[in-house]
Image (cartoon, rainbow, N blue to C red):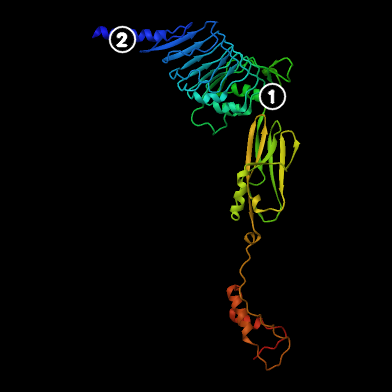
Amino acid sequence: MYLLGLIYILQSHLMVVQSCPAQCACPFGNSGAAALRSVLCSDPRISAIPTNVPADTVKLRLEKTLISRVPRAAFYNLSDLRFLWLTYNSITAIHPSSFVNLKALRELRLDGNLLTSFPWEGLRDMPRLQTLGLHNNRLSSLPAHAALFLPNITYLDLSSNRLTILPVELLDLWFPLTGQQGGSVQRRILGLHDNPWLCDCQISMVMSLSTSLGSPIILMDQLLLCRWSPGQSGVLLTQTELSRCVRPSVQPAATRVVSPLGSNVILRCDATGYPTPTLTWVKTSAYNDCCKQDILKNSDQLPRNLESFMQQSPQVGVRWSIIILNGLSYEDAGEYRCQARNMAGISEAPIKLRVVGVSRLFRLPKKKSQKTPPKPPSKYRKPNQTPTNTPLVQDNQILQKNPAPSINNTQTIPNLLPKGFPKDK
């Protein structure tokens, strides 16, 4: 029985060894109590990614080969893979779905290749990825949507490429505003050196913020070169006199506006920041108490950029803008947003406009039924004629509602008689 078990183990071991790709080595490495398989392929004659890599491989290294492209689902059977090194090959293209099923991958290195672009959306297939190395490639730009797939990356090496500008979205990811980060600040290591950066606000902000106390960003090399324009020689960023960039701040003239139907209204906002921000208006939602069915028909077109507005910059770092709405209708009601944008970031402020009918805006009081006021007594009358008590009683009732402190009700009647009229004895 013991011999049968030993034979089974030997056979399984031989089958695993035989599954190792040709021109590759498949040694075992110790990690605590477990033995982890590594596969190393560095033969310069290899021109394609091997398809018979053992399924229990934890670390795969394909280095210094003639591999020029990574096809779709190239590592689908390697669900236990944690480290993938594709360094110093001739890779020029990577399929967006090349890394499907690599849910355990922690480290991906593509240093020393010929990549001019990288499929950033492919990072969704590697939810545990923390290290991404793209050193020494030919990347010339970073798309804005790359920030959507980099929240979990704590080590990003972009050095020795052809990058010139950092998108604002990456700055928002690396340097979140106060209150946006939840809990402890996640620190990241960035490699940005050896790139022909333009001397602008983004690279200046990264440099200044990375050197501040408690910064979430640590630069591998702080000696960054930048150029004032493409083709010029680079200068150290610490030697350039760059103005400090300021994220825009937007202040609306009013956050809530109520205006009657058919009237004209002006919405205004002011923005500050450096460089001087540009302003745009966007209508984001529609609402009103009446005519909801008619308004909902056009709500599918929102949000909508508004083109008819005015803006002016009275001085550097300050800009204001107004939008004029003439002859308000219920369709004009809704939420408007004034957006300010510059190299340092984007800010916005909402303004809610409510349109009401005239009858709803001005509510007149209900008319009460009033009796016909009595005629004032004539200046002359017959001596024996006595004054009528009816108007005096009404005046007396009015005075009782608002009595004067020094007048008695009994003294009101003679005081109301006209002058020159003889008193009755």
**Amino acid type indicated by mark 2:** Tyr
Q: In the displayed structure, would residue 392 be above or below residue 28?
A: below
Q: In the displayed structure, would residue 8 be above or below residue 76?
A: above
Q: In the displayed structure, would residue 350 be above or below residue 376?
A: above
Q: Which quarter of the figure is the C terminus placed in?
A: bottom right
| Left or right of 119, for residue 227 | right
Q: Which quarter of the figure is the N terminus placed in?
A: top left
Q: Which mark is residue 160?
A: none
Q: Name the residue under label 1.
A: 200
Q: Residue 39 location in percent, x, y? A: 46, 10
User: Mark 1 near mark 2, Cβ–Cβ under 8 Å?
Assistant: no
Q: In the displayed structure, would residue 116 be above or below residue 400?
A: above
Q: Which residue is drawn at 69% across and 24% down?
A: 200
Task: Using the numbered discs, state the Cα–Cα distance from disc 1 to disc 2 in whole angstroms.
Answer: 66 Å
CA neighbours of label 1 inside 10 A, class few (<14), some (14 to 19), many (20+): many
Q: Residue 339 location in percent, x, y? A: 66, 38
CA neighbours of label 2 inside 10 A, class few (<14), some (14 to 19), many (20+): few
Q: How many marks?
A: 2
| Left or right of 372, for residue 216 | left
Disc 2 secondary structure class: helix
Q: Residue 8 carries which label?
A: 2
**Amino acid type indicated by mark 1:** Asp
Q: Which residue is drawn at 62% across and 63% down?
A: 363
Q: Nearer the viewer, residue 2 or 161?
A: 2
| Left or right of 319, for residue 83 | left
- Which badge, 1 or 2, is on the more N-terminal residue? 2
